Each structure stands twice: as C-alpha cells, then as structure tokens.
C-alpha cells in the first residue's frame, strides 16, 4: 500500500480553499431521485437521513477512522473530507453522487452484456472517484465480481465505502494508479490488454487536445484487442470544438492552461486516428445529450443565472462508445 500512498502525494500540493465558485454548501438539485434511491435501497439509508449522510459521512470521523485503519499515516487534517483528498470541482458541486453512466443510451445493453458474459467479463471504471457508477451497476444487477475501479487517489476507496456503507459487500480491488504511468511497476501496466469494457466518465475533458490523444492511446493499450471490446462514457463537450483557455480561479494567476472541448466530429476524428495508430479499426458512436442541455437551461433560469461557471450556450454533454470492430 505504500506505493499507492505515494501515487496520491506527487505533484498535487494545491490549495484546498473552499472560497471558489464551484464549492456549494448545499446539495440542492445535485441530489437526483436516482441518487437518492440508490442510497436508500442499496446503502440502506433512511429517506429522512440521506442528505445528512452525504454531508457528514463523506467528511466525518467515521470515514477518517475507516481509512486510517486500512492505510496508516492518515490524520484528520489529511482526510477530513473528500475535498481534502483533492479539490476537484466535481467534489465541490456534489457530482460524486451523480450516476452519469446510467443515463447513457446504451446502459441497458451494457447491463445485459455484463450479466450474460459473467464470470469472464472484466469492466474497469477509469477515474472512478467514489465508485458511484459501479454501485449503480451492482444495484441494477451487474455481477460485482466483474467490476473494478481505478483512480489516482487511493483514498477514494475508503470514501466510497463510507458513502455507500458497503465495505463488507464491495470488496473488489481498487487500483490506485496514474493513467499515464507506463512503468513496469504501475498497477495499471500489469492489466494491459485485459479489460473488456472501460468506462471513462468526465475524464478526457480535463485535458488539452494532445493529452486527450495520449490518454486515448493509453486506454486502447489497456483494452482487450478482441472484437467487441468497448470504451463507453460521458463527457462535457461543445457544439464549437476547440481549446478553452482556463482563467482564475481555475488556474493560478499568470498560469496558462487549456482544455479541449470536443464536438461530434472532432471526437470521432480523434478516436479514429488513435485507432489507426494502434492498428485497430474502431467503430465510434457519439451523441449530444439534448435532455441534459434542456435541464441545464431550465435550472439556470430557475436559479436566476447562478452557478454558470462551467456552463455556456455551446456546452453539451456527450454520450459515446468506442468499439473494436
């Protein structure tokens, strides 16, 4: 476990200040009916206690004590919340309880595939965070033995167990690894070519074009090369593709950083080129989530334009699959 601890300590000495636009004190509409149902039925939390559980258990002493029992050297100051693990905007906006994969148009087909191909099929949730999509899959009947999670921060394993109250039921190995680390000792390196399905929700969008290409090449190395192996996911895109210049407080003053926002055409182009370089023919399917766009606009109208830091008229959510032909 020492190596995993080192993974989550390298190069991430950033401010944990909560004085940023995306740190919300209240869950509000981020707690969907589906998320609530999962916590009530899968985790056994009383309906009247769901919100309090989310507020307290992700940052409570029980989480710290649970994590400390498994990973020595953690203190209350280091682990007093998932925000302290790393201040991702998705944590500040409660996206760690969002069940994005279940909204995918191919979700039911995915469930059927996982059930019928058990026990040989292997599913990797890459960038799993607290493993919310994995828990939803289990609740919907997917075989838990086929499901694995991977994230840069090993602490998310304990945080997920605390949130979903399933340390006794969800015991598949959690892979703590850097996606871009291809050294012989990397936990991901040891699994190259073994994954039948890789899920990447809200992962590629945090990189510029070159890093997205690099990430896709790495993902294809992890994926099994047999026909039908698939990458599935959801990510933020745009009707107008291009590099988006990040501004403070997303970056430090005078720091220059961009992220690439894909549209349908650029997304297909990227994967086709990566597949060609890897000697693979890929079938790429991608779709704008118009329902999410309508919901976002309605929410912004209702809230009087608040919380628009990550939105804009051209922003769209993309559903996609990339399949080995």
Image (cartoon, rainbow, N blue to C red):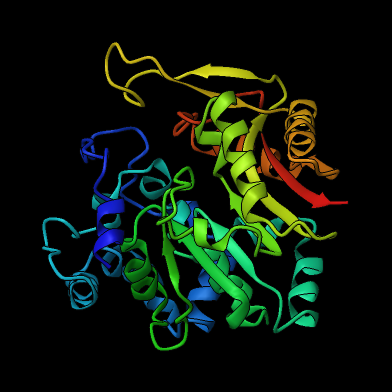
Left/right of residue 250 with respect to residue 192 in the rendered view = left
| Quarter assignment of residue 153 | bottom left
* Residue 9 or residue 233, whichever sits in front: 9
Is 74 rendered above or below residue 93?
below
Quadrant of the drawing holding the N terminus: bottom left
Percent x, y of residue 116: 80, 81
Residue at x-position 33% and y-position 23%: 251
Question: Left or right: where does residue 107 sit relative to residue 306?
Answer: right
Q: Residue at x 32, y 15 (%)?
A: 255
| Residue located at (66% from left, 59% from top) | 193
Question: How many marks overall?
Answer: 0
- Can you give x and y, in whole percent of width and height, for residue 323 in the image? 81, 52
Residue 203: x, y in percent?
A: 54, 44
* Of 93 and 110, the residue lying toward us: 110
Name the residue at the front extreme.
184
Residue furthest top in the image = 254
Residue 11, quarter of the rendered image: top left
Q: Name the residue at 54% across, 19% down.
A: 244
Could you tell whether 165 is left or right of 200 in the image? left
Which residue occupies the foreground of this view, 325 or 316? 325
**Left or right: where 132 falls relative to 124:** left
Percent coordinates x, y for residue 214 in the rendering: 58, 34
Determine which quarter of the picture holds residue 284.
top right
In this rendering, is residue 294 above or below 75? above
Q: Vertical placement of 311 versus 53: above or below? A: above
């Amino acid at each position: 476990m020492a190596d995993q601890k080192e993974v989550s300590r390298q190069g991430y000495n950033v401010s944990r200040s909560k004085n940023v636009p995306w740190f919300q004190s209240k869950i509000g509409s981020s707690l969907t009916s589906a998320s609530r149902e999962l916590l009530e039925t899968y985790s056994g939390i009383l309906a009247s206690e769901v919100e309090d559980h989310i507020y307290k258990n992700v940052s409570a002493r029980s989480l710290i004590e649970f994590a400390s029992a498994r990973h020595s050297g953690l203190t209350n100051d280091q682990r007093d919340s998932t925000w302290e693990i790393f201040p991702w905007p998705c944590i500040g906006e409660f996206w760690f309880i969002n069940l994005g994969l279940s909204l995918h148009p191919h979700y039911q087909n995915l469930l059927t595939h996982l059930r019928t191909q058990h026990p040989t099929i292997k599913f990797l949730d890459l960038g799993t965070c607290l493993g919310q999509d994995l828990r939803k899959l289990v609740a919907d009947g997917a075989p838990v033995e086929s499901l694995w999670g991977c994230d840069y921060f090993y602490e998310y394993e304990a945080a997920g167990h605390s949130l979903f109250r399933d340390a006794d039921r969800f015991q598949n190995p959690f892979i703590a690894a850097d996606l871009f680390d291809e050294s012989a000792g990397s936990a991901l390196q040891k699994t190259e070519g073994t994954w039948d399905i890789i899920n990447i929700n809200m992962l590629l969008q945090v990189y510029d074009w070159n890093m997205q290409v690099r990430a896709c090449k790495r993902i294809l190395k992890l994926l099994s090369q047999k026909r039908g192996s698939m990458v599935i996911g959801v990510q933020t895109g745009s009707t107008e593709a291009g590099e988006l210049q990040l501004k403070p407080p997303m970056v430090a003053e005078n720091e220059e950083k961009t992220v690439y926002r894909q549209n349908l055409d650029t997304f297909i182009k990227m994967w086709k080129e990566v597949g060609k370089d890897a000697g693979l023919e890929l079938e790429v399917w991608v779709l704008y989530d118009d329902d999410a766009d309508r919901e976002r606009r309605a929410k912004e109208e209702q809230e009087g334009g608040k919380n628009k830091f990550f939105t804009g008229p051209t922003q769209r959510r993309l559903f996609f699959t990339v399949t080995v032909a």
